[in-house]
Amino acid sequence: MDISSLTLLVEILDAGNLSAAARRLKMSRANVSYHLNQLERSVGAQLVRRTTRRAEATEIGLRLYQHGVAIQSELLAARESVTTLGEGLQGRVRLSVPSGYGQLVMADWLIDFKRLYPKIVLDVLFENRIADLLREEVDIAIRVMPEPPQNLVARDLGPVRYVACASRAYAQAQTLPTQLDELHRAPVVTAAVIGRQLRVSAYQGETRREVVLEPTLISENFLFLRQAILAGLGIGLVPDYVVNDDIQRGDIVTTLDDWRLSIFGTQMYMLYMPNRLHMGAIRTFIDFMLERVRAA
């Protein structure tokens, strides 16, 4: 057994199947399968359970995977220490953030980080879908969801609160919903997941209810949704950070305030692969973001 064999095992289990690992390693799938078989033969035990769609570690495979991750991390950390000696912190962080939260909350933090660490390259994607961190080669993703994926490290960034709201002019001209069920018939302005029926979950103490929505305007761009709400196009269902300033100014009013509302999930998480912390730039970015979130 050598380091290259352990690296192969790590790539297979991180990727989730042999085909994806082959693409990352720039090898054929047959070649990856051959080297895995050779490793299992040398160990004398099955390390990976293969199906047509998934590759999962056996108990001994998981132990070797953990050793492989640790060795890989130490090697990359040593290489980084040598290449950046005397030059300050360098590296690259590829980051995926939700469009609304990224633009309205995180933008100033990202600019401050870049000022502090000018030699770190920040590659920022503004998107709302749940990215495959390996397939997209994303180092860190910020996402709103009910529960984080089991195969990723998840740092809790706090609760996400949705508000039902409308422009003051709309509220004066129309009747705002005062009961949850009225949202079903209301002209709702919100984001949605393509191909899924849109529902809002509502919590009040121990009570949980769901209401099916039929929006009149849908977009993943929360800045556009904010404009549409201010223009009086309907009842907005958006995270509070999208319209907080407008609420403070009195340009937007809220309703159904007794309920805690959610569409995509109640928590925001920072997600990354377990083997990402070996890079100084990524580790520094994670610590910086957690500090900013706590302060906010």
Image: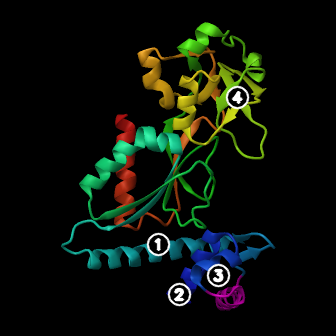
- Vertical placement of residue 288 versus 233, above or below: below
Furthest-left residue in this view: 86
Q: Which residue is mark 4?
A: 201
> Marks 3 and 1: CB-CB under 8 Å?
no
Residue neighbourhood size for the residue with mark 1, other residues' Cα within 10 Å, grouped as few (<14), some (14–19), many (≥20): some
- Residue 215's spot in the image, x, y percent? 72, 30
Q: Is residue 66 left or right of residue 83?
A: right
Q: Is residue 248 left or right of residue 86?
A: right
Q: Which residue is mark 1?
A: 70
The foreground one among 84 and 163 is: 163
- Which quadrant of the view contains residue 106? top left
Q: Nearer the viewer, mark 4 or mark 2?
A: 4
> Residue at left 77%, top 43%?
196
> Residue at left 34%, top 43%?
108
Q: Nearer the viewer, mark 3 or mark 2?
A: 3
> Marks 4 and 3: CB-CB under 8 Å?
no
Q: Secondary structure at mark 3?
A: helix
Q: Which residue is mark 3?
A: 22
> Residue at left 73%, top 20%?
186
**Of callouts 3 and 2, which one flags the residue occurring earlier in the amino acid sequence?**
2
**Of callouts 4 and 1, which one flags the residue occurring earlier in the amino acid sequence?**
1
Please state the extent of the stretch shown in magenta in the rendering.
Answer: 27-45
> Residue at left 26%, top 60%?
118
